[in-house]
Amino acid sequence: MRKLIATTAVALSVIGATAMPSAADTLKIGYIDPLSGGAASVGQIGLNQLNFIADDINAKGGVNGDMVEVIGYDNQINAQTSLVQLQKAIDEGVRIVLQGNGSSVGSAILGFVEKYNKRNPDAHILYMNYGAIDPTLTNENCSYWHMSIDANVTVKMAALTNFMTPREDIKKVYLISQDYSFGHSVADTAVAMLKEKRPDIEIVGNEFHPLVKITDFSPYIAKIKASGADSVITGNWGQDFALLIKAAGQAGLNINWYTYYAGGTGGPTAIKQAGTADQVFQVTEGISNLDYAPAQEVTAAYSERFKDAPIVFPRVFNAMGLLVKAIEEAGSQDPADFIPKLEGMEYSTFSSGGDSFIRKDDHQFFQPLYVSTFGPLEANQTFDEEHTGWGWKKVGEVAAKDTVVPTTCDMKRPG
């Protein structure tokens, strides 16, 4: 497994720059995520990483001899646009779709794929979800044709609140998230888990704001400041997190932040500019400064190639590693053939080589999770983020087996 992960990425070509050899068949991967607008920087990093991985696979002979081609489709983080782009991808021969930004988008794609596969039993589509983590996607809306590669909201919040529980300095918590299904799931889960684990903590605010629409978060920061909160829990990602923490720094708001996606594009730079060293925590599937040589080698190569956007999403590497392994074992690109290989698959994660697996019942991927904090690089750290001189440091870890939560999925299987 470690050999597979270590060799998943070495070189890169931007999309379309490397011609597919005419003598080989092509494994087309459709990437449907924002490539324009306020979330474009996050979407572009995912596309960069997929091309980086594909280029390495192709250099080693492809997948069962088939060359990998990654095709980007800009969905502008809009559900309806995503479906238009998905149909375009299908028309262009794509049978495997990756998406990860926005659970509302993920839900729309999932519904489309489920209906499409019923109507086209000889041309199945797989939705490889690397980051849309609303728990409904693997519970009441679960699908045989969907794989959820990132830990869902419930799993991550359990890890985050377990970390918060013994911290006696937490007395008053303010919740702020984006106003869509994921943001509401984060808030609802945080309220429920804090009530159970720390009933003494007071929830002093529960705020929602439009997704990727706010350019000035100072009014929201003023509310947080007035509430007397000592801590904030937020599901914000991309510019919605970066601008939020920037406004906090400008207002001199000196509190701790507990997050899902502080490490995304723009987040590290904003944290450094706000001067909030070791005050921003995130729960993720991995960070660059874990002591695991194969991942560090790949991270170094990727960062050298993408000097302007060196952030690595381990979940993208995990998604592609799982996919390639399943296709190679099945000897087929047809989702109907290789999905059985994914079900129950055991795997060594990109970031640490840690044990992980896909649960057959709901197609949720369970993996080690890490709580980390952001601050000046220490002697044993190699990678900073966004050229800030600061990096992520592990302060908590949960083994995959300890992240397992129940599912209500009643999966309908083919036949």
Image (tube, rainbow, N blue to C red):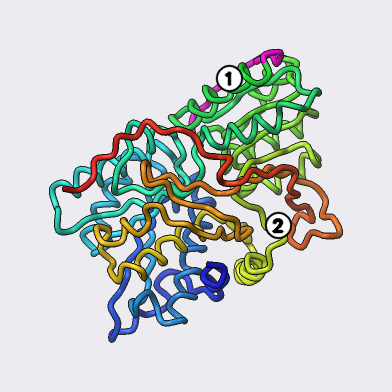
Q: Is residue 149 above or below residue 64?
A: above
At 80% from the left edge and 29% from the top edge, which residue is drawn? Answer: 254
Q: CA distance from mark 1 to mark 2?
A: 31 Å
SS assignment at label 1: helix
At 43% from the left edge and 30% from the top edge, which residue is drawn? Answer: 181
Task: Say what amino acid the circle numbered 1 marks.
Answer: Val
Q: Which residue is mark 2?
A: 290
Q: Residue furthest bottom?
A: 23
Residue 191, numbered circle: 1
- Residue 300 figure quarter: bottom right
Task: Say what amino acid the circle numbered 2 marks.
Answer: Leu
**Residue 14: x %, y % from top left:** 47, 70
Q: Earlier in the sequence, mark 1 or mark 2?
A: 1
Q: Residue furthest right?
A: 379
Q: Which segment did they paint magenta?
A: 199-212
Q: Is residue 372 left or right of residue 332?
A: right
**Residue 357: x %, y % from top left:** 48, 52
- Residue 281 figure quarter: top right
Q: Is residue 200 magenta?
A: yes
Q: Residues within 10 Å of mark 2 (few under 14, many from 20)?
A: some
**Residue 167: x %, y % from top left:** 77, 27
At 76% from the left edge and 22% from the top edge, which residue is drawn? Answer: 170
Residue placed most toward the observer, 74 or 129: 129
Q: Is residue 135 above or below residue 22?
A: above
Residue 33, numbered circle: none
Q: Is residue 14 left or right of residue 136?
A: right
SS assignment at label 2: loop
